[in-house]
Amino acid sequence: MNKTALFLFLSMASLLSCNARPNEMEQPPNKKMTDTSLNTDSSHSDTATFGAGCFWCVEAVFLELKGVAHVASGYMGGQRANPTYEQVCSGATGHAEVIQLVYDPQVISYPELLEVFWSVHDPTTPNRQGADVGTQYRSVVFYHSDTQKELALEYKKKLDESGAFPAPIVTEISAATVFYKAEAYHQNYYNTNGNQPYCSVVIRPKVEKFRKVFGEKLR
């Protein structure tokens, strides 16, 4: 993607924060959490995990991509087992809000996923996306193999050297740990709550902008 398209998308993303998700839209969390990675058929699919702020927004974008078979919102990178949404939001557990996806590398490559990841959020603000502040909103790539690690480090270096962003990229690149699937009401949030004011005002414009920039990659 050229710099103009990237900056246009980032300017929109910086305005569309997932801050202060309305309390009336939240439901009691499920008591049982999933603490395993998504199941994949290793001969035909692979797994990727990204944190880029509010997982409602990030999930909505990655669900649009050809080659992505499944996306789940969840938590990774913290110290507490089976964390709840409220515990993660407190910042005390150390987890990041992430999306974990199963994809077909013959249809969409890991570098293409990285391109989308770095284009749909601001990776230059430590522990912050717009008005969302806290370690749970940090920019992070959780790699599942040495190849993913090398590709992420190389991509990050090239972006920094290109001057695509006005400040250094602070994205954390770390080995994947236990993935805790978020409560059921967080899953596929935008598609199941699209008529909610928050979704129509905050998430929908971001998804529409994404579709314009990445039209050739849409399912």
Image: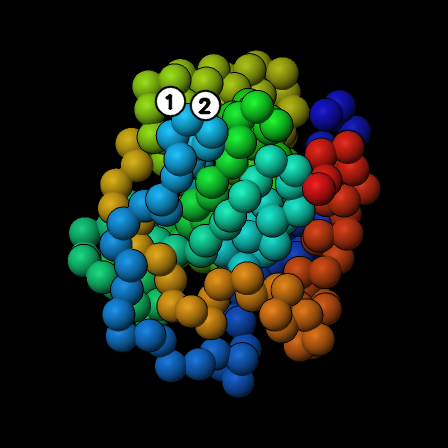
Dividing the image into 4 quarters, which one contains the N terminus? top right
Q: Is residue 114 left or right of residue 201?
A: left
Q: Residue 36 in the image: x percent, y percent?
A: 27, 49
Spatial separation of the CA atoms under disc 1 and disc 2 = 5 Å
**What is the quadrant of residue 41 in the picture?**
top left
Q: How many marks?
A: 2
What's the amino acid at mark 2? Answer: Ala
Q: In this rendering, is residue 71 above or below 149?
A: below
| Residue nearer the viewer, 79 or 74 | 74
Q: Which residue is mark 2?
A: 152
Using a 10 Å C-alpha cutoff, classify the residue at mark 1 as few (fewer than 14 neighbours), some (14 to 19) or many (20 or more).
Answer: some
Q: Residue placed at 53% from the left, 71% from the top?
A: 21
Instruction: Say what secondary structure mark 1 lies in.
Output: helix
- Percent coordinates x, y for residue 106 in the rendering: 57, 23
The kind of residue tagged 1 is: Lys
- List x then y, in percent, for residue 125: 50, 42
Quadrant of the image containing the C terminus: top right
Q: Is residue 157 above or below residue 8?
A: above
Within 10 angstroms of label 2, few (less than 14), some, or many (20 or more) residues? Answer: many
Q: Are marks 1 and 2 in contact (CB under 8 Å)?
A: yes
Q: Nearer the viewer, residue 126 or 203?
A: 203
| Residue 7 in view here | no
The answer to which quarter of the image holds residue 189 is bottom right
Q: Which residue is mark 1?
A: 149
